[in-house]
Amino acid sequence: MKSIVVHAGLPKTGTSAVQAFLIAHTEELARAGIFYPQHRVDENGVSAGNAGSLMERSGPLFVASPREVARTLEEFEASGCHTLLLSSEAFLPELPGIAELLPPQTRFVLYVRDPLAFLESDYNQRVKRLAHVDPFEPSPDAYGGWLGHEHLYHALDSEAVRSRLVLRPYLPELFVGDNLLTDLLDTAGIDTAELGDLSLAQVNLSYSLHALEIKRALNALPLGPQLQERLDIHLQSCPLGPTSYTLIPPADHERLRKIADDELHALALRYDIDSLEPMRELLREKPQKPFHAQRLTDAEVDAVVRHIASVGKRLTRRIAQTLDEHPEIELVHPSLRDSFAAAAAELDEGSPAPKRRWWWRRG
Protein backbone atom coordinates (compact mmCIF):
# COMPACT_ATOMS: atom_id res chain seq x y z
CA MET A 1 0.00 0.00 0.00
CA LYS A 2 1.26 3.48 -0.83
CA SER A 3 2.13 5.73 2.09
CA ILE A 4 1.07 9.32 2.76
CA VAL A 5 2.86 11.35 5.44
CA VAL A 6 1.70 14.85 6.43
CA HIS A 7 4.17 16.88 8.53
CA ALA A 8 2.19 19.76 10.06
CA GLY A 9 4.50 21.59 12.48
CA LEU A 10 3.87 22.69 15.25
CA PRO A 11 5.16 26.25 14.92
CA LYS A 12 8.80 26.93 15.86
CA THR A 13 9.88 23.32 15.34
CA GLY A 14 12.28 23.63 12.41
CA THR A 15 9.79 23.15 9.58
CA SER A 16 11.49 25.82 7.43
CA ALA A 17 14.81 23.97 7.53
CA VAL A 18 13.12 20.66 6.65
CA GLN A 19 11.21 22.20 3.75
CA ALA A 20 14.33 23.96 2.44
CA PHE A 21 16.11 20.59 2.30
CA LEU A 22 13.19 18.71 0.75
CA ILE A 23 12.51 21.26 -1.99
CA ALA A 24 16.23 21.32 -2.88
CA HIS A 25 16.35 17.51 -3.18
CA THR A 26 13.11 16.60 -4.94
CA GLU A 27 14.94 14.63 -7.63
CA GLU A 28 16.91 12.55 -5.11
CA LEU A 29 13.70 11.98 -3.13
CA ALA A 30 11.87 10.86 -6.27
CA ARG A 31 14.62 8.37 -7.11
CA ALA A 32 14.14 6.96 -3.61
CA GLY A 33 10.39 6.66 -4.21
CA ILE A 34 9.32 9.78 -2.31
CA PHE A 35 7.09 12.37 -4.00
CA TYR A 36 7.48 15.85 -2.51
CA PRO A 37 5.45 18.45 -4.46
CA GLN A 38 7.10 21.69 -5.57
CA HIS A 39 6.49 24.94 -3.69
CA ARG A 40 8.00 28.41 -3.43
CA VAL A 41 10.72 29.45 -0.97
CA ASP A 42 11.57 33.10 -0.22
CA GLU A 43 15.03 34.67 0.01
CA ASN A 44 15.27 33.76 3.70
CA GLY A 45 14.55 30.08 2.95
CA VAL A 46 11.06 30.39 4.46
CA SER A 47 7.83 29.25 2.82
CA ALA A 48 4.32 27.93 3.44
CA GLY A 49 5.60 24.55 2.29
CA ASN A 50 3.04 22.31 0.62
CA ALA A 51 0.04 24.29 1.91
CA GLY A 52 -1.33 24.63 -1.64
CA SER A 53 -1.19 20.87 -2.15
CA LEU A 54 -4.10 20.23 0.23
CA MET A 55 -5.66 23.66 0.76
CA GLU A 56 -6.75 26.79 -1.04
CA ARG A 57 -6.95 30.43 -0.09
CA SER A 58 -10.09 31.83 1.50
CA GLY A 59 -9.28 35.48 2.19
CA PRO A 60 -6.11 35.58 4.32
CA LEU A 61 -6.48 31.95 5.44
CA PHE A 62 -5.94 28.49 3.96
CA VAL A 63 -8.85 26.03 4.08
CA ALA A 64 -8.97 22.31 3.27
CA SER A 65 -9.75 21.83 -0.43
CA PRO A 66 -11.23 18.64 -1.95
CA ARG A 67 -10.07 19.89 -5.35
CA GLU A 68 -6.43 20.38 -4.32
CA VAL A 69 -6.37 17.09 -2.42
CA ALA A 70 -7.67 15.24 -5.49
CA ARG A 71 -5.13 16.97 -7.73
CA THR A 72 -2.23 16.13 -5.43
CA LEU A 73 -3.28 12.49 -5.10
CA GLU A 74 -3.48 12.24 -8.90
CA GLU A 75 0.03 13.69 -9.23
CA PHE A 76 1.27 11.26 -6.58
CA GLU A 77 -0.24 8.32 -8.44
CA ALA A 78 1.28 9.48 -11.73
CA SER A 79 4.71 9.94 -10.13
CA GLY A 80 5.20 6.21 -9.62
CA CYS A 81 6.52 6.89 -6.10
CA HIS A 82 5.52 4.79 -3.10
CA THR A 83 5.42 7.66 -0.55
CA LEU A 84 3.78 11.08 -0.65
CA LEU A 85 5.49 13.46 1.80
CA LEU A 86 3.94 16.85 2.55
CA SER A 87 5.11 19.53 4.99
CA SER A 88 3.50 22.79 6.10
CA GLU A 89 2.69 24.50 9.41
CA ALA A 90 -0.38 25.90 7.66
CA PHE A 91 -1.91 22.40 7.75
CA LEU A 92 -2.29 22.47 11.53
CA PRO A 93 -5.45 24.61 11.95
CA GLU A 94 -7.17 22.65 9.16
CA LEU A 95 -5.94 19.20 10.11
CA PRO A 96 -9.38 17.73 11.02
CA GLY A 97 -10.82 18.80 7.66
CA ILE A 98 -7.73 17.59 5.79
CA ALA A 99 -7.92 14.23 7.57
CA GLU A 100 -11.46 13.68 6.30
CA LEU A 101 -10.27 14.16 2.71
CA LEU A 102 -7.19 11.92 2.76
CA PRO A 103 -7.03 8.12 2.49
CA PRO A 104 -7.06 6.08 5.73
CA GLN A 105 -3.37 5.11 5.45
CA THR A 106 -2.33 8.77 5.90
CA ARG A 107 -0.15 9.51 8.93
CA PHE A 108 0.15 12.91 10.56
CA VAL A 109 3.42 13.88 12.25
CA LEU A 110 3.58 16.79 14.72
CA TYR A 111 6.47 18.04 16.84
CA VAL A 112 6.07 19.69 20.25
CA ARG A 113 8.77 22.05 21.48
CA ASP A 114 9.82 23.09 24.96
CA PRO A 115 7.23 25.78 25.77
CA LEU A 116 9.84 28.16 27.19
CA ALA A 117 12.03 27.88 24.10
CA PHE A 118 8.92 28.38 21.96
CA LEU A 119 8.03 31.55 23.87
CA GLU A 120 11.44 33.12 23.27
CA SER A 121 11.57 32.01 19.63
CA ASP A 122 8.14 33.51 19.03
CA TYR A 123 9.30 36.82 20.54
CA ASN A 124 12.45 36.79 18.42
CA GLN A 125 10.40 36.26 15.27
CA ARG A 126 8.03 39.08 16.15
CA VAL A 127 10.96 41.46 16.52
CA LYS A 128 12.45 40.19 13.25
CA ARG A 129 9.33 40.10 11.09
CA LEU A 130 6.50 42.04 12.75
CA ALA A 131 8.25 45.24 13.87
CA HIS A 132 7.72 44.43 17.55
CA VAL A 133 9.20 47.11 19.85
CA ASP A 134 8.18 46.08 23.37
CA PRO A 135 10.52 44.17 25.71
CA PHE A 136 10.09 40.43 26.23
CA GLU A 137 7.17 39.38 28.44
CA PRO A 138 7.70 36.16 30.45
CA SER A 139 4.11 34.94 30.32
CA PRO A 140 2.60 31.76 28.80
CA ASP A 141 -0.22 33.89 27.37
CA ALA A 142 2.09 36.34 25.55
CA TYR A 143 2.31 36.43 21.76
CA GLY A 144 -0.68 34.20 21.08
CA GLY A 145 0.17 31.62 23.75
CA TRP A 146 2.99 29.09 23.75
CA LEU A 147 3.05 25.80 21.88
CA GLY A 148 0.19 26.55 19.51
CA HIS A 149 -1.81 24.22 21.73
CA GLU A 150 -5.15 25.68 20.70
CA HIS A 151 -4.71 24.18 17.24
CA LEU A 152 -3.08 21.04 18.64
CA TYR A 153 -6.03 20.36 20.95
CA HIS A 154 -8.42 21.02 18.08
CA ALA A 155 -6.58 18.44 15.99
CA LEU A 156 -6.43 15.90 18.82
CA ASP A 157 -10.16 16.27 19.43
CA SER A 158 -10.68 14.84 15.92
CA GLU A 159 -10.75 11.03 15.86
CA ALA A 160 -9.76 11.16 12.19
CA VAL A 161 -6.52 12.91 13.20
CA ARG A 162 -5.85 11.32 16.58
CA SER A 163 -6.08 7.75 15.31
CA ARG A 164 -3.37 8.45 12.71
CA LEU A 165 -1.18 10.90 14.64
CA VAL A 166 2.44 10.59 15.76
CA LEU A 167 3.43 13.26 18.30
CA ARG A 168 7.19 13.70 18.60
CA PRO A 169 9.36 15.79 20.97
CA TYR A 170 11.29 18.59 19.31
CA LEU A 171 14.47 18.17 21.31
CA PRO A 172 17.84 17.32 19.69
CA GLU A 173 18.72 14.89 22.49
CA LEU A 174 15.69 12.78 21.52
CA PHE A 175 15.92 12.87 17.72
CA VAL A 176 16.42 9.58 15.89
CA GLY A 177 19.58 10.14 13.86
CA ASP A 178 21.42 13.43 13.71
CA ASN A 179 18.66 16.00 13.32
CA LEU A 180 14.99 16.81 12.83
CA LEU A 181 14.97 15.55 9.24
CA THR A 182 16.34 12.12 10.10
CA ASP A 183 13.82 11.90 12.95
CA LEU A 184 10.94 12.86 10.65
CA LEU A 185 11.94 10.38 7.96
CA ASP A 186 12.37 7.61 10.52
CA THR A 187 8.97 8.43 12.02
CA ALA A 188 7.48 8.30 8.52
CA GLY A 189 9.06 4.90 7.92
CA ILE A 190 11.13 6.21 5.00
CA ASP A 191 14.36 4.42 4.13
CA THR A 192 17.12 7.02 4.03
CA ALA A 193 19.87 4.80 2.61
CA GLU A 194 19.55 6.29 -0.90
CA LEU A 195 19.27 9.91 0.20
CA GLY A 196 22.92 10.62 1.01
CA ASP A 197 23.80 13.55 3.27
CA LEU A 198 20.81 14.58 5.36
CA SER A 199 22.43 17.58 7.05
CA LEU A 200 20.09 20.52 7.55
CA ALA A 201 21.17 24.06 6.76
CA GLN A 202 20.26 26.73 9.28
CA VAL A 203 17.28 28.74 8.06
CA ASN A 204 15.77 31.94 9.46
CA LEU A 205 18.52 32.32 12.06
CA SER A 206 17.86 33.78 15.48
CA TYR A 207 19.59 37.05 16.33
CA SER A 208 22.36 37.51 18.82
CA LEU A 209 21.23 39.55 21.82
CA HIS A 210 22.89 42.72 20.45
CA ALA A 211 21.30 42.29 17.01
CA LEU A 212 17.88 41.66 18.58
CA GLU A 213 18.07 44.87 20.58
CA ILE A 214 19.13 46.98 17.60
CA LYS A 215 16.32 45.55 15.46
CA ARG A 216 13.81 46.15 18.25
CA ALA A 217 14.89 49.78 18.50
CA LEU A 218 14.87 50.37 14.73
CA ASN A 219 11.40 48.83 14.43
CA ALA A 220 10.10 52.22 15.59
CA LEU A 221 11.21 53.75 12.27
CA PRO A 222 9.18 53.77 9.04
CA LEU A 223 11.84 51.91 7.07
CA GLY A 224 9.53 50.02 4.71
CA PRO A 225 9.63 46.31 3.82
CA GLN A 226 12.71 46.41 1.56
CA LEU A 227 14.96 48.13 4.07
CA GLN A 228 13.59 45.94 6.87
CA GLU A 229 14.42 42.82 4.88
CA ARG A 230 17.98 44.00 4.19
CA LEU A 231 18.41 44.96 7.83
CA ASP A 232 17.20 41.50 8.88
CA ILE A 233 19.70 39.76 6.60
CA HIS A 234 22.62 41.84 7.89
CA LEU A 235 21.63 41.37 11.53
CA GLN A 236 21.36 37.59 11.09
CA SER A 237 25.06 37.65 10.23
CA CYS A 238 25.99 39.94 13.14
CA PRO A 239 28.63 38.19 15.31
CA LEU A 240 28.35 40.63 18.22
CA GLY A 241 26.83 39.76 21.57
CA PRO A 242 25.68 36.51 23.19
CA THR A 243 24.13 33.90 20.88
CA SER A 244 23.18 31.45 23.63
CA TYR A 245 21.08 33.37 26.13
CA THR A 246 17.65 33.69 27.67
CA LEU A 247 15.51 36.75 28.30
CA ILE A 248 13.60 34.94 31.06
CA PRO A 249 14.77 36.01 34.55
CA PRO A 250 15.71 33.03 36.77
CA ALA A 251 12.71 33.47 39.10
CA ASP A 252 10.33 33.57 36.14
CA HIS A 253 12.10 30.59 34.58
CA GLU A 254 11.41 28.42 37.60
CA ARG A 255 7.76 29.49 37.65
CA LEU A 256 7.24 29.02 33.91
CA ARG A 257 9.03 25.64 33.87
CA LYS A 258 6.48 24.33 36.40
CA ILE A 259 3.55 25.67 34.36
CA ALA A 260 4.93 24.18 31.15
CA ASP A 261 5.55 20.80 32.76
CA ASP A 262 2.00 20.73 34.12
CA GLU A 263 0.58 21.54 30.69
CA LEU A 264 2.59 18.84 28.91
CA HIS A 265 1.52 16.34 31.57
CA ALA A 266 -2.14 17.35 31.23
CA LEU A 267 -1.91 16.95 27.46
CA ALA A 268 -0.48 13.45 27.86
CA LEU A 269 -3.24 12.43 30.27
CA ARG A 270 -6.07 13.97 28.27
CA TYR A 271 -5.15 12.24 25.02
CA ASP A 272 -3.35 9.15 26.38
CA ILE A 273 -0.06 10.18 24.77
CA ASP A 274 3.21 9.08 26.37
CA SER A 275 5.66 10.11 23.61
CA LEU A 276 6.38 13.45 25.30
CA GLU A 277 7.34 11.98 28.69
CA PRO A 278 11.07 11.68 27.87
CA MET A 279 11.06 15.39 26.91
CA ARG A 280 9.39 16.33 30.20
CA GLU A 281 12.05 14.45 32.15
CA LEU A 282 14.92 16.11 30.27
CA LEU A 283 13.46 19.60 30.51
CA ARG A 284 12.96 19.36 34.26
CA GLU A 285 16.70 18.75 34.66
CA LYS A 286 17.96 21.02 31.89
CA PRO A 287 19.88 24.07 33.19
CA GLN A 288 18.74 27.51 32.13
CA LYS A 289 20.78 29.40 29.54
CA PRO A 290 22.63 32.52 30.81
CA PHE A 291 20.15 35.30 31.51
CA HIS A 292 20.78 38.67 29.86
CA ALA A 293 18.69 41.78 30.40
CA GLN A 294 17.60 43.74 27.33
CA ARG A 295 20.13 46.52 27.75
CA LEU A 296 23.09 47.64 25.63
CA THR A 297 25.82 50.12 26.38
CA ASP A 298 26.44 52.96 23.93
CA ALA A 299 29.66 51.19 22.87
CA GLU A 300 27.75 47.98 22.11
CA VAL A 301 25.17 49.92 20.09
CA ASP A 302 27.94 51.62 18.14
CA ALA A 303 29.66 48.29 17.43
CA VAL A 304 26.51 46.82 15.85
CA VAL A 305 25.98 49.97 13.77
CA ARG A 306 29.55 49.70 12.49
CA HIS A 307 28.87 46.06 11.55
CA ILE A 308 25.81 47.17 9.58
CA ALA A 309 27.87 49.91 7.89
CA SER A 310 30.56 47.39 6.91
CA VAL A 311 28.11 45.11 5.11
CA GLY A 312 25.32 47.50 4.07
CA LYS A 313 26.56 50.97 3.12
CA ARG A 314 23.40 52.10 1.36
CA LEU A 315 21.25 50.70 4.15
CA THR A 316 23.31 52.62 6.71
CA ARG A 317 22.84 55.89 4.82
CA ARG A 318 19.09 55.30 4.49
CA ILE A 319 18.66 54.56 8.19
CA ALA A 320 20.72 57.62 9.11
CA GLN A 321 18.54 59.72 6.79
CA THR A 322 15.33 58.31 8.31
CA LEU A 323 16.57 59.01 11.82
CA ASP A 324 17.37 62.58 10.81
CA GLU A 325 13.91 63.01 9.24
CA HIS A 326 12.11 61.74 12.37
CA PRO A 327 13.63 63.38 15.45
CA GLU A 328 10.29 62.94 17.23
CA ILE A 329 10.56 59.13 17.35
CA GLU A 330 11.75 57.83 20.70
CA LEU A 331 14.24 54.97 20.46
CA VAL A 332 14.88 52.17 22.94
CA HIS A 333 18.58 52.95 22.50
CA PRO A 334 18.87 56.73 21.88
CA SER A 335 22.58 56.60 20.99
CA LEU A 336 21.59 54.96 17.70
CA ARG A 337 21.07 58.45 16.24
CA ASP A 338 24.66 59.54 16.85
CA SER A 339 26.08 56.15 15.83
CA PHE A 340 24.27 56.06 12.48
CA ALA A 341 25.03 59.73 11.80
CA ALA A 342 28.74 59.09 12.44
CA ALA A 343 28.78 55.89 10.40
CA ALA A 344 27.07 57.56 7.44
CA ALA A 345 29.46 60.52 7.63
CA GLU A 346 32.46 58.19 7.59
CA LEU A 347 31.05 56.37 4.56
CA ASP A 348 30.57 59.68 2.76
CA GLU A 349 34.11 60.79 3.61
CA GLY A 350 35.48 57.53 2.26
CA SER A 351 33.55 57.70 -1.01
CA PRO A 352 35.64 58.59 -4.08
CA ALA A 353 34.93 61.96 -5.66
CA PRO A 354 32.60 61.70 -8.67
CA LYS A 355 34.38 61.72 -11.99
CA ARG A 356 33.81 64.74 -14.23
CA ARG A 357 32.30 63.76 -17.50
CA TRP A 358 33.33 65.57 -20.68
CA TRP A 359 31.63 65.44 -24.02
CA TRP A 360 31.81 67.28 -27.29
CA ARG A 361 29.32 69.97 -27.96
CA ARG A 362 28.04 70.19 -31.45
CA GLY A 363 27.99 73.82 -32.61
Image (tube, rainbow, N blue to C red):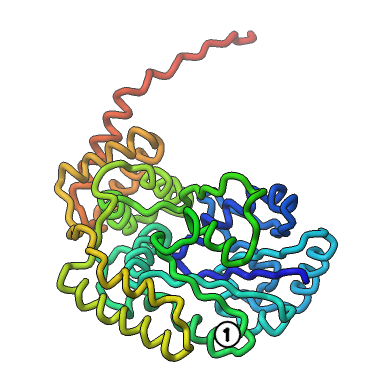
The image quadrant of residue 318 is: top left
Residue 207 image position (x, y, % from top left): 34, 52
Residue 40 image position (x, y, % from top left): 64, 55
Q: Nearer the viewer, residue 7 or 222?
A: 7
Residue at 30% over, 54% down: 212
Residue at 61% over, 66% down: 188
* Relative height, residue 359 to residue 339 (above, below): above
The image quadrant of residue 78 is: bottom right
Residue 195 located left or right of residue 288: right
Q: Which residue is mark 1?
A: 162
Q: Nearer the viewer, residue 46 or 21?
A: 21
Residue 65 image position (x, y, % from top left): 72, 77
Residue at 59% over, 63% down: 48
* Relative height, residue 161 to residue 313 (above, below): below
Label 1 SS: helix
* Relative height, residue 127 to residue 318 (above, below): below
Quadrant including the N terminus: bottom right
At label 1, counting other C-alpha atoms closer than 10 Å, the crowd grade (few under 14, some 14-19, many 20 or more) is: some
Residue at 64% over, 50% down: 193
Residue 363 image position (x, y, % from top left): 63, 8
Residue 82 located left or right of residue 120: right
What residue type is disc 1 on? Arg
